[in-house]
Image (cartoon, helix red, strand yellow):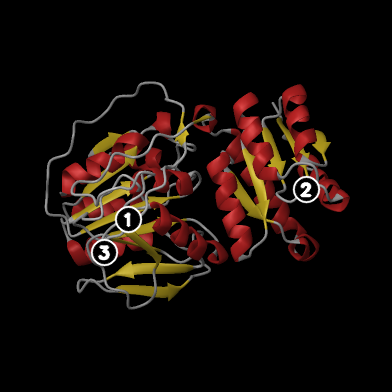
Amino acid sequence: MAVKVLVVDDSGFFRRRVSEILSADPTIQVVGTATNGKEAIDQAIALKPDVITMDYEMPMMDGITAVRHIMQRCPTPVLMFSSLTHEGARVTLDALDAGAVDFLPKNFEDISRNPEKVKQMLCEKVHSISRSNRRSLFSTPAPAPTPAPAAAPTSAFGRPAPAPVARPVAPAPVRAAAPAAAHSPAPKRKAYKLVAIGTSTGGPVALQRVLTQLPANFPAPIVLVQHMPAAFTKAFAERLDKLCRISVKEAEDGDILRPGLALLAPGGKQMMVDGRGAIKILPGDERLNYKPCVDITFGSAAKSYGDKVLAVVLTGMGADGREGARLLKQGGSAIWAQDEASCVIYGMPMAIVKADLADAVYSLDDIGKHLVEACL
């Protein structure tokens, strides 16, 4: 059965071009178009598409507001189009918080210059997010995270009072409860030298959910690999840094791992760690599908830290991280996978589980607290 798509954009040219690209795929059917957010909501309710492609900047109602309404009234996987700028990254991250599943750069030059590549990317994204877990799209009001141990005093407004270690905590969006899944027992405490987390589709929200549960005194260094364009990772790291009690920054060559600091692999490049705790940033290899690649970072951690790594694989398409996890497992390190029920896309964690590499399988809401139990 063909994937039904609603195309939303205020540009007549872009609506037509996206519709033409999608309609050329016999397994995709464009069932309607809309020129603004209000039309998008009405069409989503009336047509019940499997996927919606959504622009951000539109008259009457912008794309983020439309996504929020759609998630409340008729949850549907949304693919956002974004400009490759710092502001475009910020807007896209807001859209993902609102419930969008994934995004693609909105680049008119690429459509003209590389039509086949654009067609392949767009159709692949549409097919992949059409299979996303719709239960993960529901949003409900978020409670504030549980205060960290030994947290600084808070003001009457619930914000940390000024103090050297105090960091503001903003709640991540909370998804509706997924069906009950089999859970692994709580982890045993170990002196890990590194926590390594890899993710892709659905990862920005998942990482936010996990990292906001960690206290400022979290004792292990953290490296993060999120499949994301180069223009986005700096904005994403800045966003996480504002939300979390730990520090988060985009990794740079020569950065040193330290407790309570999470380093995010820069988009378009590869990140490795060495035994001295130094970060190496290498050019993205065109032969690799992912830049950054979870396998590369996990593999370097396995070589440098032996059995002292705790690796976590979160929601995402494909199987990136499986071979790196295999190396970590051979060295005696621990591997956790996010459970299917809480994943947006159960691809990367499924690859870990099917390869019998997972020491534990946890729901997204439990991973943060289990990291604290395992490392503190």
Mark 2 lies on residue: 58
Which residue lies at the image location 19% right of the left edge and 31% below the top edge?
185
Q: Residue furthest front?
A: 156
Tell which tag, 1 or 3, sits nearer the viewer.
3
Using the numbered discs, state the Cα–Cα distance from disc 1 to disc 3 in whole angstroms. 37 Å
Which one is in front, 123 or 330?
123
Which one is in front, 232 or 345?
232
Mark 1 lies on residue: 324
Q: Are marks 3 and 2 in contact (CB under 8 Å)?
A: no
Amino acid on which disc 3 is placed: Pro
Mark 3 lies on residue: 164
In the structure shown, which secondary structural element does the residue marked by tag 2 occupy?
Answer: loop
Which of the 4 image quadrants contains residue 124? top right
Which residue lies at the image location 53% right of the left edge and 43% below the top edge?
97
Horizontal side of residue 146 vs 331, given as left or right: right
Which residue lies at the image location 37% right of the left edge and 38% below the top edge?
144
Q: Is residue 72 visible?
A: yes
Residue 296, numbered label: none
Amino acid on which disc 2 is placed: Met
Amino acid on which disc 1 is placed: Gly
- Residue 161: percent from left, percent from top: 31, 54
Q: Earlier in the sequence, mark 1 or mark 3?
A: 3
Horizontal side of residue 36 vs 70, given as left or right: right
Which one is in front, 39 or 125?
39
